[in-house]
Image (cartoon, rainbow, N blue to C red):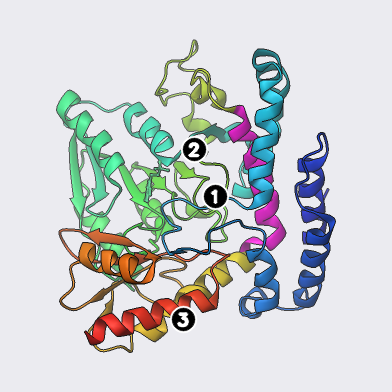
């Protein structure tokens, strides 16, 4: 049992550096993280969010380029060096004799990753499948539910395109019906969202697909409120956790949903192409797999992992990313991400012509925030920010709103955010 954050960091380093000569963190790195964390141990996560000395140490764990300012960490996150090193090491081990080392040695170790993921999500390992990303997990559910012609699936106009495509495919192929509601931008009334879902339900509604955090604006949705309302009517809830897992400090059972999928290469900073699907125990049997398993109606969550040959090194790297995440502390990380978002957003919102598409109240957003400058198309503004300032952002053009999405990460410095704010100021002034 690893009891303290410091122990987690040491454990992570030993796990990674243990078997080969490739060092994960140097002892100097570990000592500086220990020293830094000693200074903030007595602080609440909220107070620790502003302790630049501690966050400087965290920043040093990444190998990001100083040549661009990356404010699109929502798309995919960089991995700390310790995770990159773990991935390299597992890859080298696999290449010593792939069929033996990958399938017989590394394959067994996946069970430990499953246990770590389950612990992080607050669920049973028997409900956790390791896969490649949110799209794979959510499409497994969307395409695997027993639905017949005329059945309805309810979602929003702001859900992710891949999931809309999966639903659309079922519309074309099996004649199900997809109903979409609008979510106000921004929205500070969770009851309004529950109400909109409730009002769109018909006797034919069988499932609801919704985000925990909308990728376009960072809006946090009341999944639990919607799930409780839906369950009263016998409707299942699929939660898209792509932007919430290892970002917000919560446990999956808090949400009361039936299915949950996430990408671990986003906020957990795990290797690219790593994800997780959680299926409530009693739902596993009736959910069809995306790739056929010999026992399609088995109650074993591993039936969703019959994916053929893939990279076990990537999957094992997840364990190291979890150790790193736990080393920082989930609540402390959430507060730091919200602090960074507030740091720039509270400044730019005071600039004439700038408007936010995201609520700054803590219940409704954390790291992600969307802003606009009057008169600027998102794609043109994104280009301007990159060409003139080397600031990399995400343009969002939606039927109902448009803007630029900004996502800092734990390695983002206040200096970078000051530079970004001054760039917005100059552009807005024309
Ligand atoms: C809300 C949401 N769902 C799902 C996905 C898909 O994630 P992935 O490409 O890792 O499958 C994304 C990607 O950004 C997303 O923002």
Mark 1 is surrounded, within 10 Å at the Cα level, by few (under 14), some (14 to 19) or many (20 or more) other residues, namely some
The residue depicted at 77 percent of the width and 72 percent of the height is 36
Q: Which residue is mark 3?
A: 418
> Is disc 3's CB within 8 Å of ligand 1?
no
The quarter of the displayed image where residue 387 is located: bottom left
Q: Earlier in the sequence, mark 1 or mark 2?
A: 1
Q: Nearer the viewer, residue 98 or 302?
A: 98
As measured in the structure, the alpha-carbon distance from the residue carrying label 2 to the one carrying label 3 is: 32 Å
Query: x%, y% of residue 276?
Result: 52, 39
Q: Answer above or below: position of 144 versus 216.
A: above
Q: Nearer the viewer, mark 1 or mark 3?
A: 3
- The residue labelled by disc 1 is 253
Which residue is depicted at the point 77% across and 70% down? 37
For label 1, the SS is: helix
Q: Which residues are magenta?
A: 312-330
| The label number, if any, that marks residue 183 in the structure image | none
Residue on which disc 2 sits: 273
The magenta stretch spans residue 321: yes
Which mark is first along the chain, 3 or 2? Answer: 2
Whether residue 69 appears in this view of the structure is yes
Q: Earlier in the sequence, mark 1 or mark 3?
A: 1
Q: Is the residue 305 above or below the residue 257 in the image? A: above
């Amino acid at each position: 049992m690893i009891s303290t954050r410091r122990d987690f960091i040491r454990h992570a380093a030993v796990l990674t550096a243990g078997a080969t000569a490739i060092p994960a963190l140097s002892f100097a790195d570990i000592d500086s993280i220990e020293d830094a964390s000693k200074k903030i141990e007595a602080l609440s996560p909220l107070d620790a969010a502003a302790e630049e000395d501690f966050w400087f140490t965290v920043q040093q764990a990444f190998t990001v380029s100083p040549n661009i300012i990356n404010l699109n960490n929502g798309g995919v996150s960089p991995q700390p060096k310790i995770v990159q090193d773990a991935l390299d090491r597992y890859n080298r081990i696999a290449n010593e004799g792939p069929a033996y080392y990958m399938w017989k040695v590394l394959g067994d170790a996946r069970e430990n990753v499953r246990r770590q993921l389950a612990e992080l999500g607050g669920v049973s390992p028997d409900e956790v499948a390791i896969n490649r990303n949110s799209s794979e997990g959510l499409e497994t559910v969307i395409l695997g539910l027993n639905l017949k012609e005329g059945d309805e699936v309810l979602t929003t106009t702001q859900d992710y395109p891949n999931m809309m495509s999966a639903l659309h495919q079922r519309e074309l192929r099996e004649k199900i019906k997809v109903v979409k509601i609008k979510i106000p931008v921004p929205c500070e009334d969770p009851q309004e969202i529950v109400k909109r879902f409730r009002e769109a339900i018909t006797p034919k509604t069988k499932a609801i697909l919704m985000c925990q955090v909308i990728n376009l604006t960072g809006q946090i949705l009341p999944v639990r409120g919607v799930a409780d309302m839906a369950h009263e009517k016998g409707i299942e809830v699929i939660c898209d956790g792509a932007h919430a897992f290892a970002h917000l400090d919560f446990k999956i059972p808090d949400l009361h949903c039936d299915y949950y999928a996430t990408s671990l290469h986003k906020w957990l900073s795990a290797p690219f192409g790593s994800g997780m699907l959680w299926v409530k125990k009693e739902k596993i049997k009736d959910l069809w797999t995306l790739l056929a398993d010999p026992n399609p109606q088995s109650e074993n969550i591993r039936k969703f992992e019959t994916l053929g040959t893939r990279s076990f090194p990537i999957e094992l790297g997840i364990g190291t990313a979890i150790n790193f995440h736990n080393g920082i502390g989930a609540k402390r990380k959430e507060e730091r991400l919200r602090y960074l978002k507030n740091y720039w957003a509270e400044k730019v919102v005071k600039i004439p012509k700038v408007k936010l598409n995201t609520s700054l109240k803590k219940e409704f957003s954390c790291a992600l925030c969307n802003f606009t400058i009057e008169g600027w198309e998102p794609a043109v503004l994104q280009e301007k920010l990159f060409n003139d300032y080397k600031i990399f952002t995400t343009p969002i053009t939606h039927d109902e709103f448009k803007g630029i999405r900004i996502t800092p990460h734990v390695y983002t410095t206040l200096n970078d955010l000051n530079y970004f704010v001054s760039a917005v100021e100059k552009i807005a002034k024309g």
